[in-house]
Image: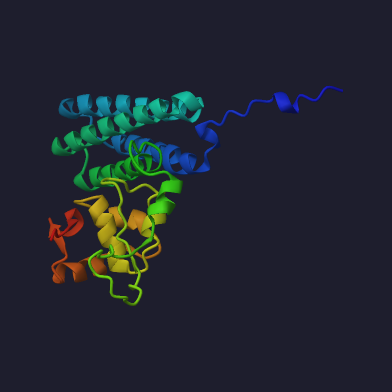
Amino acid sequence: MQNYKDNVIDIKRLSDDVEYYNNVFKKVEKIVSVLFYILSYVDTKDTSVSMSDTLKKESFKLHELSLNALHALPDSQTDSMQSVRYQLITIDSTVRVAEAGRVIAADLAQLLTEQIDVVQRYLGNHYLQSTGLSVKELHEVAISTSTPASNSSNTTAKSAPTKRARRVQVPAGDISSDAYMVYSQLTDRAERIKTVLEAKPQATVKDVAEIITDVSEKTIQRELNSLIEKGQVLREGERRWSKYSVVKD
């Protein structure tokens, strides 16, 4: 009997990717569902009908694109995810306009835009990073030791210099999950937070929490407040809109 096992081609679609399915597709599905639920209670005045219809149309399109992305072949998955990402931007912008026009209440609009932001971050950090280090490169730069350059004019024997950890160098903007392999090598929490802020200036507490996952957002906030008091970190904005950057020497 002929064995066809070796002739089977394994084509991995995004529907087989559990992380993508749970963190992108299902969350997009939830966003669309919540949006339609909200719109079902919108007063059908002439001034709000047009905006409501636009939101419904764009929501249908988002759902369709997310379904298409699930079944995309490997060579077209990036384009499919980019299409979902662009449509999320469209929805986000339209929701904000609807809020300004008092079609959607401010607290509901905030709920939607926050969920859209979560999906956007996940796509950007885990699937659509245009730059960054490979896993192998991350290990190579993680924590290495260096010794001061020897002074050729000094021939006197000296004790061996103490080795110290070299500062981790992470490409600007790289907050991918792979980059966490570098950050996690640092045992000092404050240094880990500063490393994240150097890689992503103007980061929020949520940005930091997505990288440093072994502590709570409240703990990160306390550490940031301590760094601000020490003059090592700068805060811009208030409360949930606060953004943090490392103070340059």
Residue 38 percent location from the top left of the image: 30, 39
The foreground one among 135 and 95 is 135
Left/right placement of residue 197 relative to residue 26 reads left
Residue at horizontal 34 percent and vertical 77 percent from the top? 159
Q: Is residue 73 left or right of residue 241?
A: right
Quarter of the image with the C terminus in it:
bottom left
Above or below, comparing residue 33 to residue 231 in the picture: above
User: Residue 36: which quarter of the image?
Assistant: top left
Residue placed most toward the observer, 10 or 18: 10
- Pick whichever, 179 or 91, lies toward us: 179
Q: Which residue appears at 19% of the width and 45% of the height?
A: 106
Q: Position of residue 189 (x, y in %)?
A: 32, 67
The reply, left or right, for residue 203 in relation to residue 181 is left
Residue 26 seen anywhere in this rendered image of the structure: yes
Q: Residue at x 40, y 38 (%)?
A: 127
Please count the marks in the image. 0
Q: Position of residue 85 (x, y in %)?
A: 33, 32
**Which of the two residues, 208 or 161, is positioned nearer the viewer here?**
161
Position of the N terminus by quadrant: top right
Residue 229 in the image: state x and y as whole percent: 14, 71
